[in-house]
Amino acid sequence: EDKVVQSPLSLVVHEGDTVTLNCSYEVTNFRSLLWYKQEKKAPTFLFMLTSSGIEKKSGRLSSILDKKELFSILNITATQTGDSAVYLCAGPHYGGSQGNLIFGKGTKLSVKP
Amino acid sequence: GAGVSQTPSNKVTEKGKYVELRCDPISGHTALYWYRQSLGQGPEFLIYFQGTGAADDSGLPNDRFFAVRPEGSVSTLKIQRTERGDSAVYLCASSSGQRSEQYFGPGTRLTVT
């Protein structure tokens, strides 16, 4: 059964710290892996990764995929209190449509001032 | 606004009642998805529409759940004979195509008493 496992489940850091969030994706037929940030209700899209070894970057956030190992990391440098959120990793479910995403439980990041 | 919108934002209903949750996707997005999220969990896939038709409804938990998208835009998720276990945040997302990133709405928090 396909599944997405994220670690750690929660993390507390101080402003200015750098954090690395992990996502492992056990899947029979890999297509893509997505990262979302969830504050309150709506998950906000961050990155979609399809190619191994190519880093995607947006401001202080970056992500990279190891397609062979089915593993991805999300890095946040110089963290700010506004980065506090749940970070979700997801990927298409094998046998389903591309839209049938399965999500990990998320990593809850708390950034203290 | 240009994002996905959902109404109502909160819905409290009694066990056994019927509810309808509405989703208005981003204009021009042909794909629409419904997910359900319980506390401390990632979103769980329910159903995916491509245009007017349900391309994948494998996530609907039972026949009390039904969704429609008659004109290929707005979608309604319908739950009959609600049970307390249906309480969750129901999220809607849309994308420009089957292989594109999904953009989420703010969700409807359903509470069944």
Image (cartoon, coloured by chain):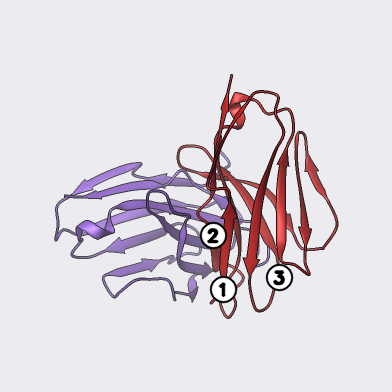
Q: State how far apart marks 2 and 3 are (Cα).
A: 14 Å
Q: Is residue A2 left or right of residue B106?
A: right
Give the residue type at disc 3: Arg
Residue denoted by label 1: A2
Q: Chain of mark 3?
A: A
Residue that lies at the very extreme toward the right in this rendered image: A54
Residue A42's place in the image compared with B52, above or below, is above
Chain identifier of the residue bearing label 2 in the image: A
| Type of amino acid under label 2 | Phe
| Image quadrant where residue B101 sits | bottom right
Residue linked to disc 2: A103
Q: Earlier in the sequence, mark 2 or mark 1?
A: 1
Q: Nearer the viewer, mark 1 or mark 3?
A: 1
Q: Residue at x 59, y 25 (%)?
A: A81
Tell me which corner region of the image, top left, top right, bottom left or bottom right, holds residue A30.
bottom right
Q: Secondary structure at mark 2?
A: strand
- Percent x, y for residue B16? 14, 61
Q: In screen coordinates, is A78 left or right of A93?
A: right
Image location (x, y in percent) of residue A43:
54, 46
At mark 3, the secondary structure is loop
Q: Are marks 2 and 3 in contact (CB under 8 Å)?
A: no
Residue beneath disc 3 = A31
Tell me how far mark 2 sits from mark 1, CA to CA: 10 Å
Q: Nearer the viewer, residue B44 or B71?
A: B44
Q: Residue A84, how many percent across, how many down?
A: 56, 32
Distance (Cα) linking label 1 and label 3: 12 Å
Query: Which of the pair A62/B11 is nearer the observer?
Result: A62
